[in-house]
Image (cartoon, rainbow, N blue to C red):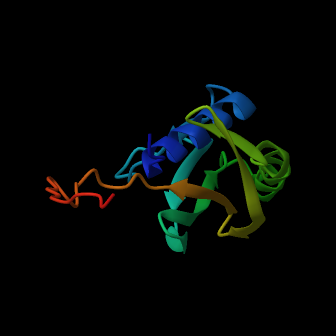
Amino acid sequence: MMISLENIKNAVSQKLNALFGDSYKIYTEEIKQGLDPPAFFIQFLEPAQKQVLNNRYYRTYPLDIIFFPVENGSEISQCESVAEILFDGMEYITVDDSLCRGTKMHYEIVDKVLHFFVQFNMHVLKSKSSDEYMKNLKYNGFMKG
């Protein structure tokens, strides 16, 4: 089975739910209106793929986990607390029964909103096509004795 962006997004959502509970909303699609803080929004930045050898590839999946705190005067403090939890919590996620490690973790707080950056890297083995290059081979020959 190929690992998809959706599978990674689901794994991150499940990890966020395990870390913070049901009182924190988790959005994976564009938020049109009605954001209900505290809430997370998961967004891929620039996933990339590099061929390593033959049908082996190395993929990088950088994410921005955006946290919207409750507006009560302690927004920056909430963001810092959430970031500390994410440093430990996003070190490993489970995607399709495989453990993936989060790397290049860092964060910034912009306009009282946390942007936590993490990257998941993995090697992918693409299956070769099942095209037959030679359907039939006829050989007429004999052995000299």
Residue 144, picture quadrant: bottom left
**In this rendering, is residue 105 above or below 51?**
above
Outermost residue on the top side: it is 22
The residue that appears at 83% across and 45% down in the rendered structure is 85
Residue 49 drawn at (x, y percent): 50, 70
In the foreground, 80 or 127:
127
The residue that appears at 74% across and 51% down in the rendered structure is 101
Residue 129 drawn at (x, y percent): 30, 54
In the image, taking residue 62 as reference, residue 131 lies left or right, namely: left
In the image, taking residue 35 as reference, residue 136 lies left or right, namely: left
Residue 2 drawn at (x, y percent): 44, 46
**In this rendering, is residue 28 above or below 129?**
above
The residue that appears at 23% across and 55% down in the rendered structure is 131
Residue 46 visible in this rendered orientation of the protein: no
Outermost residue on the front side: it is 145
Residue 99 drawn at (x, y percent): 70, 40
